[in-house]
Image (cartoon, rainbow, N blue to C red):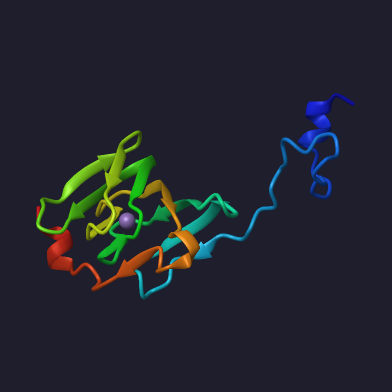
Amino acid sequence: MKKSQRAMSRGPPNVAGQEGDLVELQPKQPTAKGPDEWFTGDVWIDGIVRGEEPSRVRVMAVRFTPAARTAWHSHAVGQTLYVTEGRGLVQARGGQVAEIRAGDIIYTPAGEWHWHGAAPDHFMTHLSITEAVPHDQRPEADWGDHVSDGEYGHR
Ligand code: MN
């Protein structure tokens, strides 16, 4: 068998030092429902990357049903969103509600309060790329109020 085939096999995880430990098919965790404290509407989350120290990277695919959105929140080390599907909305506190579409990249600096979600009549999926805080000094995100229908519809 070629090395690449062995490396991508669905067998048990490769042990460091063995041949084929460079590429590893990761176990798939179940899709999780976005908690009601943090979201309005139905949102589903797939974890993709959770780096082990010294890496602190966090990557998730987040699927929003029409009109579903996050609550107001901020990220300790900022956030990059990459919209992979559909149409959505994003707003920074004090700013306008902006439309986002597949292919858009949205960066939110550390500590900036904002929300993001699907458009009223479209699904939206984005990748969320964040980092944990070094040594877990504080939460990766701070969460506030839900985005009211008035705020959501204010365009
Ligand atoms: Mn965010």
Which one is in front, 33 or 1?
A: 1
Residue 67's x, y, as percent? 28, 59
Give the left or right position of residue 114, taking residue 52 as reference: left
Using the image, determine if residue 23 lies above or below residue 27.
above
Residue 120 placement: quadrant? bottom left
Give the left or right position of residue 22, taking residue 125 as reference: right
Visible residue check, residue 41: no
Give the left or right position of residue 117, taking residue 12 as reference: left
Which one is in front, 109 or 88?
A: 109
Residue 20 placement: quadrant? top right
Circle count: 0
Point out the residue furthest to the right here. 1
Task: Write the residue at 44% across / 53% down.
Answer: 131
Using the image, determine if residue 105 lies above or below residue 90.
above
Displayed-image quarter of ligand 1: bottom left
Visible residue check, residue 123: yes
Give the left or right position of residue 138, taking residue 143 as reference: right
Task: Write the residue at 23% across / 51% down.
Answer: 90
Residue 113's x, y, as percent? 22, 60
Residue 140 placement: quadrant? bottom left
The quadrant of the picture occupied by the N terminus is top right
Which one is in front, 9 or 143?
A: 143
Residue 72's x, y, as percent? 25, 65
Task: Write the residue at 60% across / 54% down.
Answer: 52
Task: Write the residue at 26% across / 72% down.
Answer: 144
Residue 32's x, y, as percent? 53, 64
